[in-house]
């Protein structure tokens, strides 16, 4: 390991300053802030789901400001075209009078891209993000362009508005490192939101980290150690989401498909990011349990009976977390 324990403690303090600066503007939403930061540290993409007006867009913009990342916002609508995201080649005249193709970059070529209301665009347009999210490249007219590093897609969607929307296919949901549920604020938080947003004062955010420091933090996440028994527990938990012979009765009854390998990868990467935030260079059982639902909830597909019974992926994962001990099912 090229980093010392002191490096992890120091980086943890820096990340706590980042959280503190975000809280100067964003009221509450501690879980959403934490998991968005975990996703950034783990070099992954996040999907934020919540009712309109809960500050999802503002949270993402605030994080990009505090981390000094270039930011672009794409408002997804039914008439949005793939070229509106990736960019396109246009014909221009050169200085000698010849006509030639010139590539004009789209908003995807930013370090932090907000895909606002992603489920409002057609599947063809949604798929324009797949290559960028998976390989961090964009191919236009047969020419492959590299994305700016670091690169993150943070998408939002409204869980209750189904008219005029196109649900994300499972393949695209699987590209998101985690799915974050943005909860409704408490009465105290609502009061603070009103006081901050309707008064004469405005908050000026400070840039706490730069790109180089963020890349260093991402490398530190990769080098966080995970013991064999911790890895076995994560594997058991991911495998337990599949309705096979070894599954619990509830999973066999209500789950159609469980998480794939990307779910396990996400579980480990988020657990490592949480460990770094705490100033540790090893993954604990608490890290894995804490990140299990955001990492796996969007990778479980319930069957008709599960939906009819009002079951959710979260409720089944809660039961699995109580059932599975290190190394075996109880």
Image: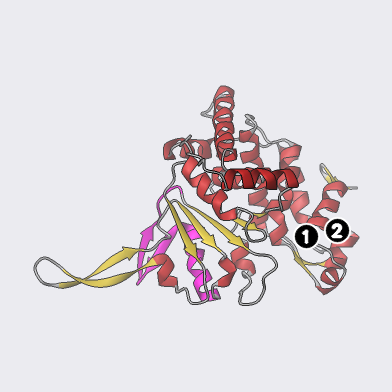
Name the residue located 10 percent from the left edge and 71 percent from the top edge.
Answer: 97
Q: Are marks 2 and 1 in contact (CB under 8 Å)?
A: no
| The label number, if any, that marks residue 246 in the structure image | 2
- The segment highlighted magenta reads 123-150
Q: Which of disc 1 and disc 2 is earlier in sequence?
A: 2
User: Is 293 positioned to the left or the right of 24 in the image?
Assistant: right
Residue 255 lies, in percent from the top left, at 81, 66
**Residue nearest the observer in this picture, 88 or 63:** 63
Residue 225 lies, in percent from the top left, at 63, 34
Where is mark 1, residue-wise? 313
**Residue nearest the observer in this picture, 146 or 89:** 89
- Outermost top residue: 6
Element on which disc 2 rests: loop
Q: How many marks?
A: 2
Decide whether residue 127 is among the magenta residues. Answer: yes
Name the residue located 63 percent from the left edge and 71 percent from the top edge.
Answer: 167
Decide whether residue 139 is among the magenta residues. Answer: yes
């Amino acid at each position: 390991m090229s980093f010392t324990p002191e490096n992890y403690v120091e980086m943890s303090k820096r990340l706590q300053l980042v959280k503190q600066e975000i809280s100067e503007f964003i009221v509450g939403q501690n879980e959403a802030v934490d998991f968005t930061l975990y996703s950034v540290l783990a070099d992954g993409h996040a999907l934020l789901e919540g009712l309109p007006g809960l500050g999802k867009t503002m949270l993402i913009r605030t994080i990009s400001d505090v981390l000094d990342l270039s930011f672009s916002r794409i408002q997804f609508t039914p008439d949005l075209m793939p070229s509106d995201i990736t960019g396109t080649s246009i014909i221009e005249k050169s200085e000698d009078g010849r006509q030639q193709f010139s590539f004009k970059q789209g908003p995807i070529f930013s370090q932090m891209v907000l895909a606002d209301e992603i489920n409002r665009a057609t599947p063809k347009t949604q798929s324009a993000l797949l290559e960028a999210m998976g390989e961090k490249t964009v191919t236009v007219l047969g020419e492959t362009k590299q994305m700016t590093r670091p690169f993150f897609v943070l998408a939002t969607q409204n869980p209750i508005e189904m008219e005029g929307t196109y649900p994300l296919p499972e393949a695209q949901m699987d590209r998101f490192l985690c799915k974050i549920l943005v909860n409704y604020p408490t009465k105290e938080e609502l009061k603070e939101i009103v006081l901050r947003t309707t008064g004469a004062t405005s908050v000026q955010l400070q840039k706490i980290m730069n790109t180089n420091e963020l890349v260093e933090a991402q490398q530190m996440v990769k080098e966080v150690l995970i013991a064999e028994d911790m890895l076995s527990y994560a594997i058991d938990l991911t495998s337990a989401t599949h309705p096979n012979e070894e599954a619990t009765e509830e999973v066999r009854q209500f789950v159609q498909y469980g998480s794939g390998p990307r779910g396990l990868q996400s579980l480990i990467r988020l657990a490592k990011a949480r460990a770094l935030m705490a100033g540790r260079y090893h993954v604990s059982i608490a890290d894995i349990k804490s990140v299990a639902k955001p990492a796996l909830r969007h990778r479980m597909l319930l069957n008709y009976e599960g939906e009819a019974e009002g079951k959710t992926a979260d409720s089944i994962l809660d039961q699995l977390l109580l059932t599975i001990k290190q190394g075996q099912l109880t």
